[in-house]
């Protein structure tokens, strides 16, 4: 049974950085999605800007890699179809030495 929540935990299964798409494995069901879009603010460039005499330029890096944990949202259509949108990476948190 697929999740009924519109927000899901997932793991990145495939990355297409050229087209900025991901495939994810929905947890805990193990279902692999089709290619997913991601939120714009997670990787788009920040426009160059100047503060005083200093020019700031930002070179964004595609942050997604296989096996990373992400939070995703499912958009359900009226015909029973679903599309996932990756909201962003989940923080791994501090490493425990136990």
Image (spheres, rainbow, N blue to C red):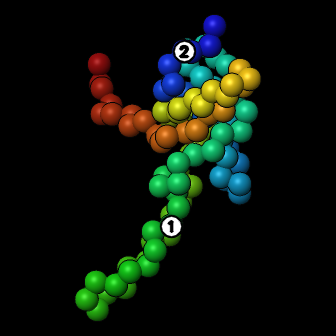
Looking at the image, which residue sits at the far front?
78
Is label 2 in a helix, a strand or a loop?
loop
- Label 1 Cα crowd, 10 Å radius (few <14 / some 14-19 / many 20+): few
When asked about the image quadrant of residue 35, the answer is top right
- Tell me the residue that label 1 is attached to: 45
The x and y percentages for residue 93 are 33, 34
How far apart are the two marked residues, 2 and 1, measured between alpha carbons? Answer: 34 Å
Q: Is residue 41 left or right of residue 76?
A: left
Is label 1 in a helix, a strand or a loop?
loop
Seen in the picture, residue 59 relative to 97 is either above or below; the reply is: below
- Tell me the residue that label 2 is attached to: 4
Q: Residue at x 65, y 52 (%)?
A: 20
The x and y percentages for residue 98 are 29, 19
Is 85 or 13 nearer to us in this picture? 85
Q: Residue at x 67, y 46 (%)?
A: 21
In the rendered structure, which disc, 2 or 1, sits on the residue that comes first in sequence?
2
Q: Of circles 2 and 1, which is in front? A: 2
The x and y percentages for residue 78 are 69, 25
Is 82 or 8 nearer to us in this picture? 82
Count of marks, rendered view: 2
Looking at the image, which residue sits at the far left?
52
Q: Is residue 56 left or right of residue 75?
A: left
Q: Is residue 82 visible?
A: no
| Quadrant into which the N terminus falls | top right
Q: Is residue 42 visible?
A: yes
Looking at the image, which residue sits at the far bottom?
53
The x and y percentages for residue 48 are 44, 79
Q: Is residue 43 left or right of residue 50?
A: right
Q: Residue at x 31, y 87 (%)?
A: 54
- Label 2 Cα crowd, 10 Å radius (few <14 / some 14-19 / many 20+): few
Seen in the picture, residue 49 relative to 35 is either above or below; the reply is: below
When asked about the image quadrant of residue 53, the answer is bottom left
């Amino acid at each position: 049974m697929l999740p009924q929540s519109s927000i899901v935990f997932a793991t990145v299964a495939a990355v297409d950085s050229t087209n900025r798409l991901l495939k994810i494995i929905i947890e805990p069901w193990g279902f692999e999605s089709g290619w997913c879009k991601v939120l714009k603010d997670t990787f788009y460039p920040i426009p160059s800007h100047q503060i005083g005499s200093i020019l700031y330029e930002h070179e964004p890096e595609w942050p997604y890699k296989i096996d990373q944990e992400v939070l995703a949202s499912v958009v359900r259509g009226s015909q029973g179809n679903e599309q996932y949108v990756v909201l962003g990476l989940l923080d791994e948190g501090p490493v425990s030495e136990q």
